[in-house]
Image (cartoon, helix red, strand yellow):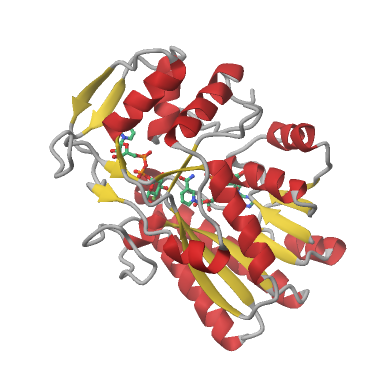
Amino acid sequence: MRILVTGGAGYIGSHACVSLLETGNEVIVVDNLSNSKMESISRVEQITGKNIQFHKTDLLDASGLDGLFERTKPDAVIHFAGYKAVGESVAKPMMYYHNNITGTINLLESMKKHGVDTLIFSSSATVYGDADRVPITEDFPLKPYSPYGWTKFMIEQMLRDLHAANPNMSIVLLRYFNPVGAHPSGNIGEDPNGIPNNLFPYISQVLIGKRKKLHVFGNDYPTPDGTGVRDYIHVMDLVDGHVVALEKLHGKQGVFTYNLGTGIGYSVLDIVKAYEKASGKEVPYSFTERRSGDVAICYSDPSKAKAELSWETRRSLEDMCADSWKWQTQNPKGYE
Ligand code: NAD
Ligand code: UFG
């Protein structure tokens, strides 16, 4: 298939391009490089030995996007492009609503005009907010708590409404838990700008000497060791979920929603220990205040994706830490 990948130069998008190319698809990337570098595309080409058709286009440029659909005629779209920092979305809500929602509306209008009916959308576990219990299944109430989370919620709703009016469409909503790690080659990975918000890149930057120590946000949560529990999923398992969804659901009418997680919760201190083992280095850390907006425990029930897509995660926490560390040590300055 010929797949148009929005945000394909970014962290998850670049890994998805590897899986898509390795399973025989043609890949067209649309990215404005607002949070990524062209180098990631070259690296994907090196890993796979295949070419990507890259277009530096902003989803907010409706006519540019439309021209691109006209020229490339994709069979399906995987939509990763968007802003994703929770804290920044609280400070700059309109920037988030504009980029994520208007960008998606432009994309959907181009798809409609050019008869493209299959879409896979990157949603997030953040749509569940502070869930009443774990593990979280897809039918849990949706109650996001940040503008970022609301953009995911609103786009999901928009897609359900769009499908109701156009029942021939095939729409897949994938709710990611905590994607981490990197391609096992260490050639592509997560390259955050400035101080990382997320645990894995923060730990790896402490270990290469870029940051002094890890600040563990809270040790008084109602969890076994008092630190926050999350469902970390290897980015290669996550992107394989997209390829399987595409293979199984392309052309199948409906809106299909799946959690992509492992179903296992690890605490911050579990991650510190696993990372120490993978790197052979000690992670200096201290406990600080809880981070505002953080929930105590969040992990998925991934059984729907297993039953309906025959997809399940294959990589362990050890793989996540080892691959994250390999990427960091091979690329201490990211893609620079
Ligand atoms: P990322 O920032 O690395 O990738 C997003 C890409 O989209 C970047 O390359 C950026 O340049 C591009 N982009 C942003 N706005 C654009 C626009 N208007 N036009 C064209 N390109 C644009 O983020 P990621 O971690 O790869 O996340 C991919 C998707 O998955 C996002 O939608 C994110 O919300 C979602 N998601 C991520 C996580 C996570 O923890 N990484 C968790 C849940 C959901
Ligand atoms: N943590 C620390 N110190 C740090 C960074 C994180 O102790 O420097 C802790 C957090 O408090 C949390 C855990 O590590 O307990 C994981 O935090 P991350 O920031 O890595 O991930 P989150 O679960 O907070 O956020 C992720 C995605 C968001 C998404 C959210 C909810 O990054 O995009 O899941 O699904 F909105």
Q: At 41% from the left edge and 55% from the top edge, which residue is drawn?
A: 148
Q: Which residue shows up at 30% across the image and 70% down it?
A: 141
Q: How many marks?
A: 0
Residue 201 vertical placement versus 316 (above, below): above
Q: Position of residue 288 (x, y in %)?
A: 19, 28
Q: Quadrant of ligand 2?
A: top left
Out of 78 and 135, give the one closest to the viewer.
135
Say whether residue 234 is left or right of residue 93. Answer: right
Answer with left or right where residue 101 lies relative to residue 30: left
Reply above or below: 325 against 57: above
Relative to 150, say whether 294 is above or below: above
Q: Residue at x 26, y 57 (%)?
A: 134
Q: Is residue 145 visible?
A: yes
Nearest the camera: 57 or 285?
285
**Residue 162 location in percent, x, y?**
57, 80
Left/right of residue 229 with respect to residue 222 in the rendered view: right
Residue at the right extreme? 71
Based on the displayed image, in which of its 4 quarters is residue 301 positioned? bottom left
- Which of these two is toward me, 34 or 47? 47
Which quarter shows the C terminus? top right
Across and down, in percent, residue 256 comes to 53, 72
Asked whether residue 80 is in view, the answer is no
User: Residue 307: percent from the left, percent from the top?
Assistant: 50, 67
* Residue 204 found in image quarter: top left
Considering the image in quadrants, where does the N terminus appear?
Answer: bottom right
Residue at horizontal 55 percent and vertical 31 percent from the top: 191
Displayed quadrant of residue 67: bottom right
